[in-house]
Amino acid sequence: MHRRTDLVFAAVGVTAALSIALFGATYLLQRLVLPWERSLKEAKS
């Protein structure tokens, strides 16, 4: 059985990069779609 650790590390790296990109995209989308949410958080503090 051949183990392709380089392929596994590449897959982990791509998955991590996609996860960070999707998190950032949802954060930006939330700020655009729900602008009142941020003003409510600022009012509480």
Image (cartoon, rainbow, N blue to C red):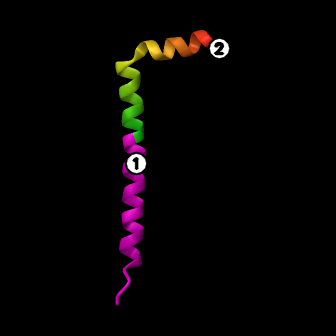
Separation of disc 2 and disc 1 at Cα? 30 Å
From the image, tell me which residue sits under label 2: 45
Location of the C terminus by quadrant is top right
Callout 1 amino acid? Ser
At mark 2, the secondary structure is loop
Q: Position of residue 8 (x, y in %)?
A: 39, 71
Is-magenta flag for residue 13?
yes
Main SS, magenta region, reads helix
Callout 2 amino acid? Ser
Q: Tell me where the magenta segment starts and ends, as one range.
A: 1-22
Q: Is residue 42 above or below residue 8?
A: above
Q: Residues within 10 Å of mark 2 (few under 14, many from 20)?
A: few
Q: Position of residue 41 (x, y in %)?
A: 55, 16
Residue closest to the far bottom:
1
Q: Residue at x 57, y 13 (%)?
A: 42
Q: Position of residue 22 (x, y in %)?
A: 37, 42
N-term-proximal mark, 2 vs 1? 1
The quarter of the picture where residue 44 lies is top right
Q: Residues within 10 Å of mark 1 (few under 14, many from 20)?
A: few
Q: Residue at x 37, y 80 (%)?
A: 4
Residue closest to the far top:
43
Q: Residue at x 51, y 11 (%)?
A: 39
Q: Position of residue 6 (x, y in %)?
A: 39, 75
Q: Residue at x 34, y 90 (%)?
A: 1
Q: Would residue 7 appear left or right of 41 to someone viewing this image?
A: left
Q: Which mark is residue 19?
A: 1
Q: Would residue 45 appear left or right of 9 to someone viewing this image?
A: right
Q: Is residue 38 above or below residue 1?
A: above
Q: How many marks?
A: 2
Is-magenta flag for residue 20?
yes
